[in-house]
Amino acid sequence: MIYQKQQAGLILIIICLIMMVGATIPLFTMKDMELSFYIIFGTAILILLLFYQLTIRVYKDKVVLSYGVGIIKFTKKIDKINELRPTRTPWYWGLGIRFTPNGWLYNIHSLNALLIDYTEGGKLRKMSIGHPEPLELKEALQKMDVIHSES
């Protein structure tokens, strides 16, 4: 492995904690709220487990992105990198896993990202990986053996 970085999704964690507290309060004031409590609390726990962090791993020929405990995982086998460009994503593209005009976007808390123009299986593709320090990720990707032309 060339590089590994974990990013906590603080916004998501805060939202889920608010959901959990909000689901708990009615238990003390109203009767027959147990089912609602379990549904909301369980949903918040599930979301937290699946998405509380984004882990980026760079190997010599692939990039592995995994969310939360690792059930949601994306492996991008890269034959050739054509361009690496730090960028800033618009706020309305949101957080998480999104399809954008720049290909797939994988992020968890930052509007900063690294746009990667690459070849996978003979096809040109683009993706953006949200990262608080995109130049750090760019340096790691430049260590891969698949750089075509550095930018």
Image (spheres, rainbow, N blue to C red):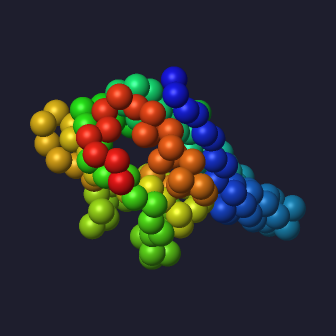
**25 sits left or right of 141 in the view:** right
At a point 79% along the width and 60% down the height, the residue shown is 21
Residue 97 drawn above or below residue 65: below
**84 sits left or right of 24 in the view:** left
Q: Is residue 116 visible?
A: no
Q: Position of residue 47 (x, y in %)?
A: 58, 48
Q: Position of residue 141 (x, y in %)?
A: 44, 39
Q: Position of residue 71 (x, y in %)?
A: 49, 32
At a point 43% along the width and 40% down the height, the residue shown is 142
| Quadrant of the image containing the C terminus | bottom left
Q: Quadrant of residue 79?
A: top left
Total marks drawn? 0
At a point 57% along the width and 62% down the height, the residue shown is 110
At a point 69% along the width and 57% down the height, the residue shown is 10
Q: Is residue 81 visible?
A: yes
Q: Quadrant of residue 4?
A: top right
- Residue farthest to the right? 28
- Residue farthest to the front? 150
Q: Position of residue 9 (x, y in %)?
A: 64, 53
